[in-house]
Image (cartoon, rainbow, N blue to C red):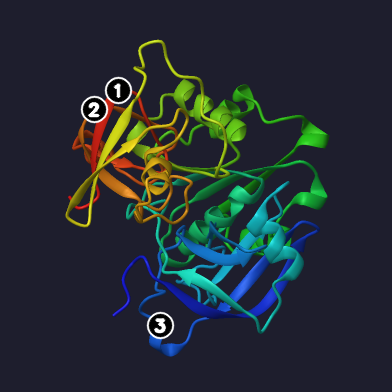
Amino acid sequence: MATDHEFHELTVAAVVTETADARSFVLDVPEALVPTFGYTAGQFCTFRADIDGASVVRCYSMSSSPDVGDPLTVTVKRVRGGLMSNWMIDGLRGGEIIEVMRPAGRFVLQPRETPVLAFAGGSGITPVLSIVKTALATTSRPILLVYANRDVASVMFARELERLEHASDGRLRVHHSLDDAHGFLDVATCVELIGDETDADVYVCGPGPFMDTAEAGLALVGFPDERVFTERFVVPGEPARPADATDEVTESLVVRIGGRRHTVEYQAGDTVLETARRGGLAPPFSCEAGSCATCMAHLDDGAVRMRVNNALTPDEVAEGWILTCQSLPTSRTARVDYDA
């Protein structure tokens, strides 16, 4: 029986050009795997491919919605130096096979009837589009989508958004913010666009600076954290911020996995996951971007700082759970339990 962490071979049914640097990949899910690949709007799948002799794993969100009859579709935008995105856009064609893990993620439509306010930047539109389509199909909620891009040519799903807006009887309003025409979206503009939508659930997805701006605007208006849902797109390998003055120099980690404890010497700058792998261990992991929780473990002792957390709830963090792919030790020693 397949586990949550297993990859399955799926056939690419079609490749759709969205913009000059973005493609949608329609996946053919065989009947036997339909239950495995059932998903909620806003979730993502993890992909694995052998690229130049190395196994590369990345996560991409569904732009399709399971509630409108869409085939399972993910959309990928080219990233400068991106191993997987460039490989998929340049070389993956219809009829070919790609390894895919079952859907995951918590950036999903909440089961309420409050209005929906969404901020999407660039390829951050991918899960937001999925959520918007489901909200239109399954609820009567009004939706305001603020979508930021460099220029008209970089707007993904322009025709589909226009079609959805026209067919929504006024429920969906799309505001396009174009850098070349309007300048970068700023906090004051975010506040102006929010207007009276202060009782909405808010969904924010896109590059870090864009999300920081949107979240600053929401904070200025006074949105409570529990009504703001975010999905950050992080490129694995991004440098961590410098250590705080209060951080201790870490010497070693004790890792429990497979019923055994291992002490691994720590190298400055490594995450807990990197340390475990450097020590010859085989801990679970997938996206390495802080989004899927495949690598989660319990911190039994010591302290860490998570660079990104898009997967664990505040209660889980309070209970000691960490995303090892994003956790940098900040104490002299730390004990981590993958078996917990």
Q: Residue at x 60, y 66 (%)?
A: 50
Q: Secondary structure at mark 3?
A: helix
Left or right: residue 209 compared with residue 180: left
Element at label 1: loop
Between the residue at mark 1 and the residue at mark 2, the CA separation in whole angstroms equals 6 Å
Q: Residue at x 64, y 50 (%)?
A: 123
Q: Is residue 322 above or below residue 168?
A: above
Q: CB of mark 3 within 8 Å of CB of mark 2? A: no
Residue density around tag 3, few if under 14, some if 14–19, many if 20 or more, within 10 Å: some
| Mark 1 or 2, nearer chain start | 2
The number of discs equals 3
Q: Categorize mark 1 by other alpha carbons within 10 Å: few (<14), some (14-19), many (20+).
A: some
Label 2 sits on what residue type?
Answer: Gly
Please give the label number shown on residue 249. none
* Residue at mark 3 to residue at mark 1: CA–CA distance: 44 Å
Residue that numbered label 1 is attached to: 331
In the rendering, at what x and y percent does residue 287 appear? 47, 53
**Within 10 Å of the Cα at label 2, are there few (<14), some (14-19), or many (20+) other Cα atoms?**
some
Residue type beneath disc 1: Ser
Residue 326 image point, x, y percent: 42, 39
Do labels 1 and 2 touch, CB within 8 Å? yes
Q: In the image, 103: left or right of 236?
A: left
- Which dot marks residue 302? 2
Q: Is residue 67 left or right of residue 316?
A: right
Query: Which residue extends farthest top?
Result: 245
Q: Residue at x 58, y 44 (%)?
A: 235
Q: CA distance from mark 3 to mark 2?
A: 41 Å
Residue to which mark 3 is pinned: 33
Can the viewer see residue 4 in this picture?
yes
Mark 3 or mark 1, which has the lower sequence index?
3
Residue 171 visible in the current orientation? no
At x 65%, y 81%, the residue is 96
